[in-house]
Image (spheres, rainbow, N blue to C red):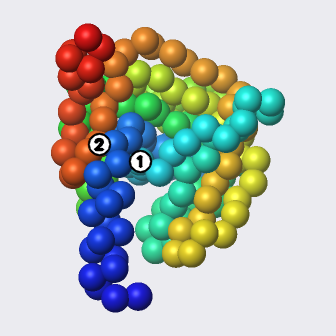
Amino acid sequence: MTNEKINDFKQVMGNYPTGVTVITATAQDGTPVGMTVNSFASVSLDPMLILWSIDKRVSTYDTFINAKQFAVHILAADQAEMCALFASHGLDRFKNCDWEMSAEGLPIIKGAAGVLHCSMHTTVGGGDHRILIGEVKHIDNHGKEPLLYHRRKFDAIPESFYE
């Protein structure tokens, strides 16, 4: 594939507004792991399924692929710094945010618009990524406005959108 085609793909996809999520899980040794993800979507209502994809080259790939459960945090409009933190490299992400361990053993970041507690349903190959499908077991809905991503920028939904 040519660089021009890759750049065109990135530009077109970057023009598609999405919400922003942070996915968290717990490694086998009990260490919390997390990453920023915007490749998130609902799949089914019965059973209640969602999906997201992970790059096969990320350091936490094996942890997420082998996790029996994970949490999807739909970031709130005021959590752009959380998005940047969990997209960064070389930082102790959980040392730099307010979080707690759930009764099920999932790291839950405080302040999200909503959190979906999921069990791993299945994974599917997808090129240089793997698609993870989770079954939603519990929902925390905090009723906050979501953080949006568009053209490499993060922001809230403009009030004019609702007029």
- Secondary structure beneath label 2: strand
Q: Which residue is mark 1?
A: 38
> Is residue 77 placed above or below 15 in the rendered structure?
above
Residue 74, labelled with which disc?
none
Q: How many marks?
A: 2
Give the alpha-carbon distance from disc 2 to disc 1, as whole Å: 8 Å
Judged left or right of residue 58, residue 123 is right
Q: Position of residue 96 (x, y in %)?
A: 26, 39
User: Please, what is the three-letter code of the amino acid marked with disc 2?
Assistant: Tyr
Q: Position of residue 156 (x, y in %)?
A: 24, 27
Q: Do the residues under discs 2 and 1 have CB atoms within 8 angstroms?
A: yes
63 and 55: which is toward the camera: 55
Q: Residue at coordinates 51% horizontally, 27% vertically from top-left?
A: 115
Dot 2: within a 10 Å radius of its alpha carbon, few (fewer than 14), some, or many (20 or more) residues?
Answer: many
Q: Residue furthest right?
A: 46
Q: Position of residue 20 (x, y in %)?
A: 37, 40
Q: Residue at coordinates 33% horizontally, 42% vertically from top-left?
A: 17
> Is residue 77 placed above or below 22 in the rendered structure?
above
Q: Which residue is mark 2?
A: 149
Q: Quadrant of residue 59?
A: bottom left
- Secondary structure beneath label 1: loop
Judged left or right of residue 128, residue 75 is left
User: Please, what is the three-letter code of the amino acid marked with disc 1?
Assistant: Asn
